[in-house]
């Protein structure tokens, strides 16, 4: 190997202190958030499914504002594609959830040391996606049980019922948005520091030509 080849090989090699995001951290946060979601759904199914005196069971947490009530949502957020036939809807959401999981893992592997918001946001979103994916595999629908609403003019206005997985996904997306905002201010690219601005200095004046002999 020539000296030039060795120099090129050293230039192409990653630095010794190159950052590699912890896959253990990704796994732990994902498992914890997915487990919290599935455990809460298991509780909701056991405590709230069925009817009580002909009405759906519910637990009032904050009067006229916040209840726990068991529902099955075959669609996406805000009941998106709820009316789609089952033989189309279920494969669609299984594919979308699986693709989201692969995408999140691939992005996580490329984050940089200073991207703390992205480092937390991606595992939270992944845990939520896994929790809802497990529901779709088991039931073909997602268990929702958190119900916020207000009463105006005697009418209840409800926010779409959601679950712990949705909370994890929203928190993850907000953290990723925060990382994007911070990146615009401090980085030129994904985790790459912006080069420092060069100071504006006046160009030096060219040296005066020497006078020809005899004119000095």
Image (tube, rainbow, N blue to C red):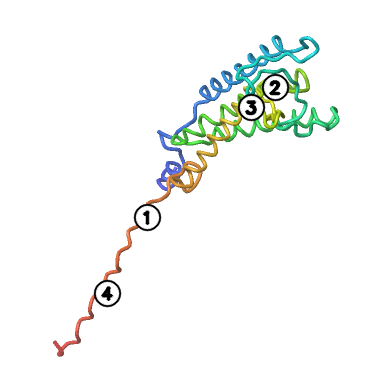
Can you say which quadrant of the picture contains the C terminus?
bottom left
Lower position in the chain sequence, tag 4 or tag 2:
2
Q: Position of residue 101 (x, y in %)?
A: 65, 29
Cα distance, mark 3 to mark 1?
Answer: 42 Å
Estimate how packed mark 3 is, as few (under 14), some (14 to 19) or many (20 or more) residues with alpha carbons within 10 Å: many
Q: x, y percentage for residue 12?
A: 47, 42
| Callouts 2 and 3 close, C-beta under 8 Å | yes
The residue carrying pointer 2 sits among few (fewer than 14), some (14 to 19) or many (20 or more) residues within 10 Å by Cα, namely many
Which of pointers 2 and 3 lies earlier in the amino acid sequence? 2
Circles 3 and 1, Cβ within 8 Å, touching? The answer is no
Q: Which residue in the protein does label 1 denote?
A: 197
Pair 1/4: label in front:
1
Q: Determine which residue is flagged by label 4.
A: 206
First along the sequence among labels 1 and 2 = 2
Q: Which residue is mark 2?
A: 144
- The reply to whether the C-beta atoms of the residues labelled 3 and 4 are less than 8 Å apart is no
> Between 86 and 113, which is closer to the camera in this rendering?
86
Q: Nearer the viewer, mark 3 or mark 4?
A: 3
Q: For the point 59% across and 34% down, which residue is it? A: 106
Task: Kindly identify which numbered label has been placed on residue 115.
Answer: none
Residue 209, horizontal then vertical, whole percent: 23, 80
- The answer to which of 170 and 207 lies nearer the viewer is 170
SS category of the residue bearing label 4: loop
Mark 4 and mark 2: span between their CA atoms? 76 Å
Mark 1–mark 2 Cα distance, whole angstroms, equals 52 Å
In which quadrant of the rendered view does residue 75 lie?
Answer: top right
User: What residue sits right under mark 3 in the picture?
Assistant: 166
Give the distance between the C-alpha atoms of the residues marked 1 and 4, in whole angstroms.
25 Å
Left or right: where does residue 204 sit relative to residue 75?
A: left
Front disc: 4 or 2 = 2
């Amino acid at each position: 190997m020539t000296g030039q080849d060795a120099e090129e090989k050293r230039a192409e090699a990653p630095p010794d202190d190159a950052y590699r995001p912890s896959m253990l951290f990704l796994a732990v946060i994902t498992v914890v958030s997915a487990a919290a979601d599935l455990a809460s759904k298991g509780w909701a199914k056991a405590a709230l499914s069925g009817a009580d005196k002909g009405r759906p069971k519910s637990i009032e947490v904050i009067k006229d504002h916040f209840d726990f009530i068991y529902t099955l949502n075959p669609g996406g957020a805000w009941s998106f594609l709820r009316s789609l036939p089952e033989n189309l809807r279920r494969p669609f959401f299984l594919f979308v959830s699986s693709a989201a999981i692969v995408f999140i893992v691939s992005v996580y592997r490329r984050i940089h040391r200073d991207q703390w918001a992205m480092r937390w946001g991606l595992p939270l979103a992944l845990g939520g996606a896994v929790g809802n994916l497990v529901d779709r595999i088991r039931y073909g629908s997602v268990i929702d049980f958190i119900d916020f609403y207000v009463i105006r003019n005697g009418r209840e206005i409800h926010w779409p019922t959601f679950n712990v997985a949705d909370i994890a996904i929203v928190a993850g997306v907000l953290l990723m948005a925060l990382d994007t905002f911070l990146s615009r201010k401090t980085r030129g690219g994904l985790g790459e520091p912006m080069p420092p601005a060069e100071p504006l200095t006046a160009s030096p004046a060219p040296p005066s030509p020497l006078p020809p002999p005899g004119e000095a």
